[in-house]
Image: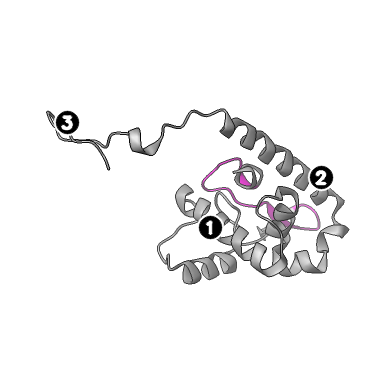
Amino acid sequence: MAVLHQESRFRARARPGWRLLLGVIPVGPASSAYGYGQVQAGTWDDYQRSAGRPAARRDRFEDVVDFVGWYADLIERRVGVSKDDAYNLYLAYHEGPTGFQRRSFEAKPWLLGVAQKVSARARLYGAQRTQCAVPALASVSAPTPAGSTRRAR
């Protein structure tokens, strides 16, 4: 969730800024990134194929949450970054697994600062989650037709 906050502030149709010619003339989007996760088109295509989700969309929240989990798993398998390590996970998310292995983030001091913010937000969200009261599944009743007393199993 901290990644999605950083990438789009939870805006479904977020896009990157424009490339500028001579510093003032817009000539097109800076990248193909789009949606909640600012996912590049090629990476999204890989996800759709690999996850078997051809109808998934970058501007549909549940699809992007699934993507972030899929990508975090890919990053963990390819470069060994734990899913519990929000700082390095964000660096690998931003730079891609190959860029992370090449340590391309070291030439981007601003990105290291962003990764620190993502890590702090992840800790905040984790602390908030522990404060949530979640009922035990066995005691939660499923919706039933009017007049029925049937409980979920």
Residue at image mark 2 = 113
Magenta highlight on residue 10 = yes
Q: In this view, does 68 lie to the left or right of 120?
A: left
Residue at image mark 3 = 149
User: Residue 145: x and y, percent?
Assistant: 15, 35
User: Residue 45: x and y, percent?
Assistant: 52, 69
Give the magenta-colored segment's residue range. Answer: 7-24
Q: Which residue is drawn at 83% across and 64% down?
A: 103
Quarter of the image containing the N terminus? top right
Q: Estimate the spatial distance between the alpha carbons at disc 2 and disc 1, rounded to whole Å.
A: 24 Å
Q: Which of 142 and 55 is in front in this view?
A: 142
Residue type at numbered disc 3: Thr
Q: Is residue 81 left or right of residue 35?
A: right
Main SS, magenta region, reads loop
Q: Which residue is drawn at 86% across and 51% down?
A: 109
Q: Residue at x 62, y 42 (%)?
A: 5
| Residue 44 appearing in the image | yes
Going from the N terminus, do you reach mark 2 or mark 1 first?
A: 1
Q: Quadrant of residue 91?
A: bottom right
Q: In this view, does 48 lie to the left or right of 121?
A: left
Q: Estimate the spatial distance between the alpha carbons at disc 3 and disc 2, rounded to whole Å.
A: 55 Å
Q: Which of marks 3 and 2 is in front?
A: 3
Residue type at numbered disc 1: Phe
Q: Is residue 95 above or below residue 87?
A: below
Label pair 1/3, CB-CB below 8 angstroms: no
Q: Estimate the spatial distance between the alpha carbons at disc 1 and disc 3, rounded to whole Å.
A: 39 Å
Q: Residue at x 66, y 62 (%)?
A: 76
Q: Mark on residue 91?
A: none
Quarter of the image containing the C terminus? top left
Residue at image mark 1 = 67
